[in-house]
Image (tube, rainbow, N blue to C red):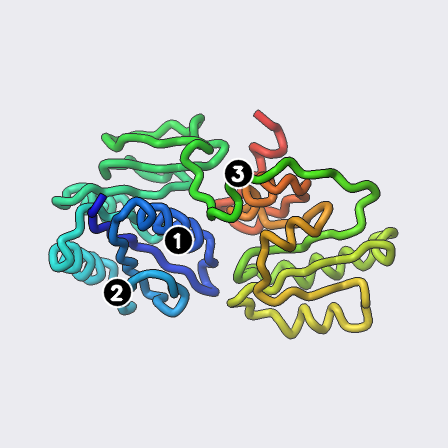
Amino acid sequence: MDDIIAIRVDGNSDIGFGHLMRMKALAHEFVKQGAKVIFLSRNPENIMDHQVLKLEKQAWDEEDLRVEKILVDVQADMIIIDSYDYTQERLDRVGQLDVLSVYIDDLNRYSFNTDYVINGNLYAPRLNYQGRANLLLGTRYLLMREDFLHLAKRVVIHPVQNVLVTFGAADMENVTPGVLQVLKGYEQFEHLQWHVVIGPVFRNVVDIEDMAKGYPNITLHYNPDIKNLMDLCDISISAAGSTTYELAVTGVPIVLVIVGEDQVMLAAKQLYKG
């Protein structure tokens, strides 16, 4: 495989890192197959392992023209888009390009006329997609980092000792401090070890550090190896985003907290197991 694949994705403190992390996982697999991957992003500082062409902040129609020119210049064979900023009009335009077009979806908000739509979420097969796109739906197509593949079955530890608290790489809604405040009122709080993740683009670090002062059973983990931390912990409190799947494959029970519209369907699927 010697295709040139362009990936349009952003990841920062305003939108989180979920889109970027799954595109890095996909890019890793493409490179293993011999493809050349080029990221097109407004946040090149957060993409260290691949070639990145920076996109400036500009009107969406101007950006689309810039992306289309790049696709021609690099002779791309495929464009993969993972962004909630794409509208029906923008996606229709992508679908008309002279390259294979793929959109990574979560919400089914439009009629999709790209060549492919990929939605690897648990709830995806029951969504009523419209448009001409070929559909790749369900967890068979889940985009997950290599660290979380082919894991051994977890040994359950009783009683619970270590609790993981994680709200992604950004905690955009500033949930962590409030959760810690609530947990301090839990009757078993002092008997448990609380492991709190502080992601690389948190803007509420000082608030979290203040909440942890004087509590030796709260450990703050700054941008940790999340897989190792999941292996350590017996249960987790997490946003209902992409981390949910990583916790699931590592066998860590989850208390889900919905912090965004895009997390509602996944949380509901977990709740009703339907």
Amino acid type for the residue under numbered disc 3: His
Q: Percent position (x, y) of residue 79?
A: 24, 48
Q: Percent position (x, y) of residue 78?
A: 21, 46
Disc number at residue 87? none
Amino acid type for the residue under numbered disc 1: Lys
Helix, strand or loop under label 2: strand
Amino acid type for the residue under numbered disc 2: Leu
Asked whether disc 3 touches disc 2, contact meaning CB atoms under 8 Å apart, the reply is: no
Give the left or right position of residue 144, taking residue 214 as reference: left
Cα separation between marks 1 and 3: 18 Å
Helix, strand or loop under label 1: helix
Disc number at residue 150? 3
Q: Nearer the viewer, residue 187 or 250?
A: 250
Mark 1 = which residue? 24
Say which residue appears at 55% left-offset and 70% top-offset. 203
Say which residue appears at 29% left-offset and 68% top-offset. 57
Q: In front of the other: label 3 or label 2?
A: 3
Q: How many C-alpha atoms fall within 10 Å of the one at disc 3: few (<14), some, or many (≥20)?
A: few
Mark 2 = which residue? 53
Cα separation between marks 3 and 2: 33 Å
